[in-house]
């Protein structure tokens, strides 16, 4: 790109709190000037980019995602796009035939709404591959579907007791069906699977970079990182080939947390020692519950379908309080998965306990998802400085919602889901993430739903729960400046997420102004180019 780039010929959106401009100057990877000053200094640039009537804005950040998982999805059977159980089985059959060398057939991620109650039978996969283990992850990444050989190798039989923090759905005769829910059950299989080669994981991270940069994203919170994942990130950092900014959230397991904390400290130090400008490991990830679709999301009132009553708490309250206080005292940022209203309350209580015990500091704790928030807890986000990192794409009446979610919650609670506008109106920081590959990692698709509460087909008219619709400016901010705040990157030499002199030139160029098109068209806006620190396509450093 040379030493500098001058942009004009379109709209320059510096942020919701700034006036639109018509020019931007970038020098040495940082924004040097905006508007009239940029025009006056245009000669300092060696490259001129005509925006062609397009829209230049801060690049997007993804406040909660799983880039390695996403990158690995293309390394197995292509089940993501399958619209029926028969299609999945046929794709697994095809892949297995083309890869006779594969000891295990693993893939992701299938649509959990294709079978009644999300329950999939091992015998369906046996039809495709009877002699090798097959393990598929569902879209929610909390569920596995296995064939009989995988269950056999994991020692899962009718005599296997229900695991701690998990469930093994069974047939009428007590034999395992083939669906495994949550970690306690999932770990029975993953414990006997061969580990992935580090090269495969490195390639997955690089594929994730391709995916994100094509969609205008330059920073990602990897929200579930285990020791092998850290090694893959360290390796790609050592090679100097990390093309995204990534912060690692180290997974906290309630079954072995005391042993984990020293490991987390060593992992953070290892990342610091590599010293790559795009890689940090400053966060610890807690799961407070599961997901509503499995009836493992923790609710204050029982599920309508009643199988799990109030759902599943991953941590006992005192244990979560103690663990959150410990990682907070060690200087980590806390990031808590909380889907149900009981889990959100438990997460807020744990953060409040850490604040009381460890005193004031710039901690920026995160509660991710917040699908249901009790009215008594809404104001606590702002009061405690908790960032609500929410997934706007989920706030629509798609098949997942109508087939699995609404029947479990009932009409009153269903109407209270994803309170984006409610939380933003309290003064709490609302950041956006995708949870990719659980759902699409394209921010414009999420912004389209945030601004309409409609499916891509425009249903329902006027939007689902329309009182929670956000303005496009607010949604853009949630995917840019608010994520930069979550990333501790909204000030100082590391700042990005807005367009102002001195800030890193992390930019996305859209074909047109997203504020000037109907929400239904937002998801189809073309990303013309993405820049990280002024470099097109985020070349390696």
Image (cartoon, rainbow, N blue to C red):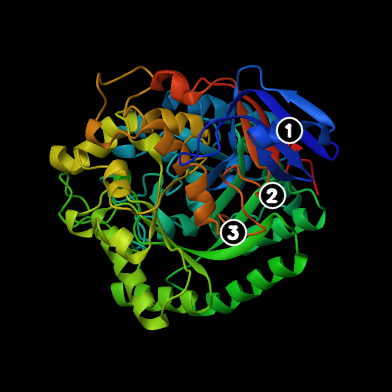
Q: Residue 216 appears in which quarter of the rendering?
A: top right
Contact between labelled residues 1 and 2, with CB atoms less than 8 Å apart: no
- 430, 179: nearer the viewer: 430
- 202, 370: nearer the viewer: 370
SS of the residue at dot 3?
Answer: strand
SS of the residue at dot 2?
Answer: helix
Mark nearest the camera among 1 and 3 is 1
Residue 49, relative to residue 350: is it above or below? above
Pinpoint residue 382: horizontal percent, then vertical percent. 32, 59
- Residue at the spot of label 1: 40
Marked residue nearer the N-terminal end (2 or 1): 1
Give the CA distance from mark 1 to mark 3.
41 Å
- Residue at the spot of label 3: 248
Is 311 displayed left or right of 228 in the figure?
A: left
Residue 97, relative to residue 512: is it above or below? below
Marked residue nearer the N-terminal end (3 or 2): 2
> Which quarter of the image is occupied by the N terminus?
top right
Q: Which mark is residue 201?
A: 2
| Residue at the spot 70% in from the left edge and 29% down from the top edge | 7
Is 138 displayed left or right of 45 in the figure?
A: left
Q: Using the rendered image of the protein, determine whether residue 161 is visible from the camera's viewpoint.
A: yes
Number of residues whose C-alpha sits closer than 10 Å to that of mark 1, classed few (under 14), some (14–19) or many (20 or more): few
Q: Using the rendered image of the protein, determine whether residue 153 is visible from the camera's viewpoint.
A: no
Give the CA distance from mark 3 to mark 2.
15 Å
SS of the residue at dot 1?
Answer: helix
- 454, 11: nearer the viewer: 11
Pinpoint residue 371: horizontal percent, then vertical percent. 30, 47
């Amino acid at each position: 790109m040379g030493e500098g780039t001058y942009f004009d010929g379109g709209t320059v959106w510096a942020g919701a709190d700034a006036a639109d401009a018509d020019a931007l100057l970038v020098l040495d990877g940082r924004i040097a000037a905006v508007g009239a000053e940029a025009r006056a200094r245009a000669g300092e640039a060696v490259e001129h980019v005509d925006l062609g009537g397009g829209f230049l804005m801060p690049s997007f950040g993804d406040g909660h995602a799983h880039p390695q998982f996403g990158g690995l999805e293309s390394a197995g059977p292509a089940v993501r796009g399958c619209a029926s159980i028969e299609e999945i089985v046929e794709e697994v059959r095809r892949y297995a035939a083309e890869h006779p060398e594969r000891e295990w057939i693993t893939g992701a991620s299938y649509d959990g709404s294709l079978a009644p109650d999300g329950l999939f039978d091992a015998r369906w996969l046996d039809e495709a591959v009877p002699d090798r283990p097959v393990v598929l992850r569902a879209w929610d990444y909390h569920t596995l579907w296995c064939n009989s050989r995988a269950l056999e190798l994991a020692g899962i039989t009718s005599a296997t007791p229900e695991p701690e923090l998990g469930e093994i759905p069974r047939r009428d005769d007590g034999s395992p069906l083939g669906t495994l829910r949550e970690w306690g059950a999932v770990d029975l299989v993953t414990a006997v699977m061969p580990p992935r080669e580090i090269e495969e994981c490195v390639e997955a991270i690089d594929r994730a970079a391709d995916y994100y940069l094509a969609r205008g994203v330059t920073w990602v919170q990897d929200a579930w990182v285990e020791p092998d994942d850290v090694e893959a990130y360290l390796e790609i950092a050592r090679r100097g080939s990390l093309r995204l900014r990534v912060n690692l959230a180290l997974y906290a397991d309630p079954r072995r947390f005391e042993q984990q904390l020293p490991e987390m400290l060593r992992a953070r130090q290892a990342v610091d020692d590599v010293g790559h400008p795009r890689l940090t490991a400053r966060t610890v990830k807690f799961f407070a519950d599961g997901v509503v679709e499995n009836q493992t999301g923790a609710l204050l009132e029982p599920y309508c379908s009643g199988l799990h009553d109030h759902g599943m708490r991953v941590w006992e309250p005192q244990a979560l309080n103690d663990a959150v206080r410990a990682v907070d005292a060690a200087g980590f940022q806390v990031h808590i998965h909380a889907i149900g209203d009981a889990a959100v309350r438990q997460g807020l209580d744990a953060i409040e306990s850490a604040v009381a015990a460890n005193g004031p500091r710039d901690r920026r704790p995160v509660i991710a998802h917040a699908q249901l928030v009790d009215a008594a807890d809404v104001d606590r986000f702002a009061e405690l400085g908790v960032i609500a990192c929410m997934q706007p794409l989920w706030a629509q009446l798609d098949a997942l919602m109508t087939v699995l979610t609404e029947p479990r919650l009932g009409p009153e609670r269903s109407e209270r889901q994803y309170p984006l506008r409610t939380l933003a109106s309290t003064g709490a920081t609302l950041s956006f993430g995708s949870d990719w590959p659980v759902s699409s990692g394209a921010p414009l698709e999420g912004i389209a739903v945030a601004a309409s509460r409609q499916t891509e087909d425009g249903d329902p008219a006027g939007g689902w729960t329309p009182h929670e619709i956000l303005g496009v400016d607010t949604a853009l901010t949630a995917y840019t400046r608010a994520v930069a705040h979550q990333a501790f990157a909204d000030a100082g030499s590391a700042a990005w997420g807005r367009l102002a002199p001195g800030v890193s030139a992390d930019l996305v160029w859209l074909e047109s102004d997203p504020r000037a098109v109907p929400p239904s068209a937002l998801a189809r806006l073309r990303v013309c180019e993405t820049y990280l620190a002024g470099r097109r396509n985020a070349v390696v450093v």
